[in-house]
Every structure is written in structure tokens, then in C-alpha cells.
Amino acid sequence: MKYVAFDLGASSGKLFEGQLRGNSLQIAPVYSFPNGVVCLRDGMYWDFLRIFSELVAGLRRAEASGQVDSLGVDSYNNDFSLIDANGEMLIPLRSYRDSRTQKHWDAIFEIMPMREVYMHSGNQIAPFNTLMQLAAMNLNGQHFLLENAHRLLMLPDLLGYYITGRTGIEYTVAAETELMNLATKQWIEPIFAAYDIPRRLMPELRMPGTILGPSTPEFNSQHHLRGFDFVNVCEHDTASAFLASPLDRDAILISSGTWALVGLETGAPVVNDFTYRSNIANEGGLDGHHRLLRNVMGSWLIQELRRDYALDGLELDFPAIQRLALEAAPFRFPIDPDAPEFYLPNDMRRKIRDVSQRLNGVAPETPGEYFRCVYEALVMKYRYCIELLETAVGRSYGTVNIFGGGCQDRLCNQFVADACGRKVVAGPIDASSIGNIVVQMLAHGELSGMEEAKAVIHSSFDFMEFAPKAYDEWNRHYPDFLRLFEDNSPA
């Protein structure tokens, strides 16, 4: 069988095709396109119509080399649209980085205290959550949209609806809405009531590995495709990426991309006062693959700095960035990469300069100093998050597995090993697409279970290892960063 994974990220969309040949999972890129937010007045949106058309173009490309049997979609989380009973979209898709939730932050938690929200859902407290977006809509006077809508559909499920004609909400995206109890897999009625969110908007819950249905004849005819099954994979891209780790519960796992998701796998949610104070997220996955994690801003800061320099006419590729960072003097500009100033796009260089000047009395000046500042902040934050997670589960881990696009950054991998004093295993690169395809194979019976899938992944892809070389030096400067991280705790 030929499987296609559509992995939609904040900066790009990619389609991979995959097949199982013997004990080897073979995947290959077939199509990609840039993605990004569209700014309109003070709103930030995703161009859903373009995303849909690019998906169709990618499917046509995949079909050029043979019949596509199955499609799965994974993407960033929390963003949604509303449809009416005829399937018409009522609102465009707002981006999770839209500032409306931050504007209403205090008012949202006057309705229900932050701790109570956390104890209900176990999700992290963050401005991008679906609950925050819905609450902001009501506070903006847009409750009439919720009252008159038929269904709320998350981004991957919205694509699935326009392909199959069937609605649903896949579990791993439902689990991140702050509207679901992960232990019971039930909607949290007190939250719906407190925030005046119509419960009827939520479609049928579908577990990962469910075949939602075939593409409709209308869809196939309109887009000149032969037809395929749409599978509800782990539609939250982090859930898909974590499935691609060959180390599973034996390592700290970091899904590295625009966001860095620092986590570990557990058998069940862990929700208590410590996880609340530490803002540790509980996230759903394939059965038996529950996650505890902390979000870190990830390569977002590097991407934004690159854009700032490109606007000045200085184009920097990643090898150049790494070389400049390595040449810069170390540990001069401690910052927290998750400081609220860095959440929104544009003018990142100025934001970093202002924050460093305020905290340290001095700020970066050269490109190498800026990138070195960000690298150090990121890997020190990884260490901080790892220590919180280990405390939450009462266990230590000697290995860190970094996967996703960011695992190609050798300098960052070495810095993580040095800062954390642990071995780093880097790979696989296309983790979300691998996890996506694996769940499709499970749905169609081509793999028997995750034990077989992990063995196949381990034998099919290359991995790099990095040992600590300068732990004592990094450890000596860790307290300078630790005080910043503790000061910025959102809870």
C-alpha cells in the first residue's frame, strides 16, 4: 500500500509518501510549500483555502507515481473553524499566535481560576489553547457565532471533512483544547458552562487509527484524483513525532522545530499541585503513549532573527548561523527564550536586545552574539524542563532523544549534551511524517502494533550521538539562567 502523510507546520507544509518493504519503512518527500500567517488589522490568520489547494496539488503529485491508498494529516494544534449545517465555513482560521487571547488573559481567568482550569484538563496554561480562543471570542462580543454554528472543527479535521464529508474530532487534538478530561476522555461540562461554550458544537470523538472514510466521489472528480482512505492519525504533530522516537520511555524526548516540545512518555496523566506550579502539560497520544511535556519557543527565535537580518540584506543559512554562534563569546547574555516579549512575530532582534539590556545591562550586537544568546537560552531551558519532568515522575533519564527538523542542528545537539550532562541521540528527522504513516499502517493492518513499528523505525533511519564535552562550564552558568526561568513561571 502507498501512504501519504501531510505534515503541516507553522512555516511549511510537506507531503511524504511511505511504503513498507520487508522490515524497512521507506519514506520520500513528494511536495512542499511555504506556510505562514496572514496579518489583517490586529488579527493573525491561516490561509486555509491555500492550505487545502496545496494539499490537493501534493496528492496529485503523489498519484503521478502510483495509486494513493491512504492519507493522514497532522498539524500544529489548537486552531479551528466553525461550520454551519451545510458545511459552510463561518469564520477564518485564527492563528494560535493571535494576540486576542493575551488581551483578555486576566478576564478569562476571572471566569474560572487558573488552577481550577488546570486541574480539570491537565493542559498547560498558555495563550494559544483552544479554550482561550473561544473565551476570547465571547469577550470580543462574538458569542453569536458560537450560537449559530453547527460544528467546531480543528484544522486537520476540517481538511478531513472537506475530503470525506464526515465530521469528527481526533483524540490527540481534542486532548489539547483544555475542554477534555484526559483520564476519562470526556468533555469537561463545568468548563463549557462557565465559559458559555455550546457543548453541541463538539463533533464525535475519534481515536487515532480510525479510518474516517473514503474521499468522496465529488472530491475525487473535482480534483482529478482516484480516491483514497482518510485516516485519523495522531493529528497533533507532536503526538505523531513522539511515536517516531526509537527510545520510547527510556529517554527524555525533544520534538525540535518551530516549537521545541520537551517531554517524556507515561502510562497515564499526572495532574497535581507540582505539575500545576511547573505548568507541565498532559497530552494525549496513541493508546499507551501519554505525554508529559513543556513547550519551549524552539527555532522560532532563530527563524525570526534570520528574517530580521534578511530584511537588512544579510542572508544567513544554518551552517553560517552555527559558525557565527560558535565564534561568539559564551554566556554573556542570559535570557528566557519563553519571555512573553518573544511570542509574537517581527522585530525579534530589537526584542532580544531590549530584554537582555534590562536583565544584564548589556545586549548582543553582532549576528553571532544574537544567535549564541538564543542557543544558550534554548538549551538551558531544555535542562530546566527536563529537571521539572524528572521531579514530576520521580525518575532520572540518562539519554535525550532529539527528533524532527531541528535535530539536524549539530551545534544545538552538542550544546544540549553539554548543558544537560547527558548523551544525546539525534533522529529521525521527519518524525511527524513517520509517526503519521505508522498510524496509517496500523489502521490498515500492515503493522501489528507499536512494538513492531518501533523496531521498523529503528532499523530504517540513521541516528547521530553526542556525548557531553563541557558540562562543568555550562553547569557553572546554569544558575544565571535558572533565576530567569523561575521568575517567568506563568503559574
Image (spheres, rainbow, N blue to C red):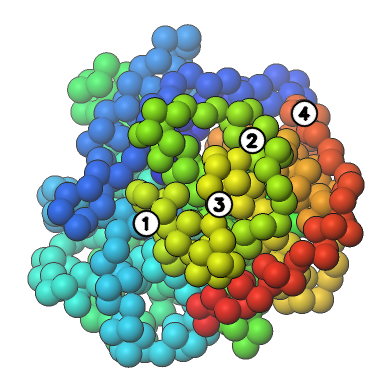
Disc 1 + disc 3, Cβ < 8 Å: no
Disc 1 + disc 4, Cβ < 8 Å: no
- Inter-mark Cα distance, 2 to 1: 25 Å
- Inter-mark Cα distance, 1 to 4: 35 Å
Q: Three-letter amino acid code at disc 2?
A: Leu
- Inter-mark Cα distance, 4 to 2: 27 Å
Residue 344, disc = 1
Q: What element carries label 4?
A: loop
Disc 4 + disc 2, Cβ < 8 Å: no
Front residue of 480/294: it is 480
Neighbour tally class for label 3: few under 14, some 14-19, many 20 plus, Cα within 10 Å: many
Residue carrying label 3 = 364
Residue 171 position in % (x across, y down): 48, 59
Front residue of 341/270: it is 341
Residue 224 position in % (x across, y down): 27, 16
Residue 324, disc = 2
* 191 in relation to 168, above or below: below
- Inter-mark Cα distance, 1 to 3: 20 Å
Residue carrying label 4 = 462
Disc 3 + disc 2, Cβ < 8 Å: no
- Inter-mark Cα distance, 3 to 2: 13 Å
Task: Indicate left or right for 11 with 362 as reference.
Answer: left
